[in-house]
Image (cartoon, rainbow, N blue to C red):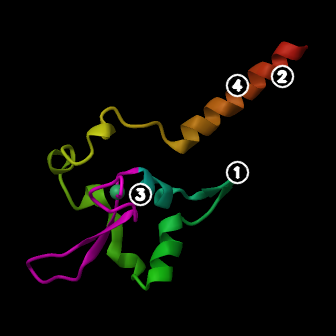
Amino acid sequence: MPECPVCGDKGLVRVRFESGEPDRFGICLCEWGERLRVARNGRHATNPLWQAVAAQRGIPLEAVVPLESLYDPEELAPLFPALAPPAPPAETLEAALIAAGRTRRRGRR
Ligand SMILES: [Zn+2]
């Protein structure tokens, strides 16, 4: 069973509009969506992973948007209770690890 009831662990959610405008694909706010938002390969900035996934699935890039741009926070809150408080972004974790490394090096002197 998928862990994320919103995207089914795919990271992308197809959103259809009653108005008939073209479907959009929201990048989920779960762990899987967060992985798609990563625009980094080690130290190097890259295109976000969702671009590769969209291209692979034949989804036009302009149809892909963050899920939070399609829904209000009040609509998303019940679906993602884990978001409050928000998890630290990957860069923060990286910075913390780098800082820890510096501390360790200093300790050896
Ligand atoms: Zn999800």
Read off the residue under disc 2: 105
Q: For mark 3, does the 10 Å Cα neighbourhood hold few (<14), some (14 to 19), or many (20 or more) residues?
A: many
Spatial CA span between label 4 and label 1? 17 Å
Contact between marks 3 and 1 (CB within 8 A): the answer is no
Task: Return the x and y of residue 104 as percentages of the image width and height.
Answer: 79, 20
Identify which amino acid the numbered label 1 is placed on: Arg
At 62% from the left and 30% from the top, the residue drawn is: 96
Quarter of the image where ligand 1 sits: bottom left
Q: Which part of the image, by quadrant, shows the C terminus?
A: top right
Mark 3 and mark 1 lie on one chain; the one further toward the N terminus is 3
Residue 43's tag is: 1
Toward the front, the furthest residue is 1
Read off the residue under disc 4: 100
Mark 4 or 3: the one toward you: 3
Read off the residue under disc 3: 33
Q: For mark 1, does the 10 Å Cα neighbourhood hold few (<14), some (14 to 19), or many (20 or more) residues?
A: few
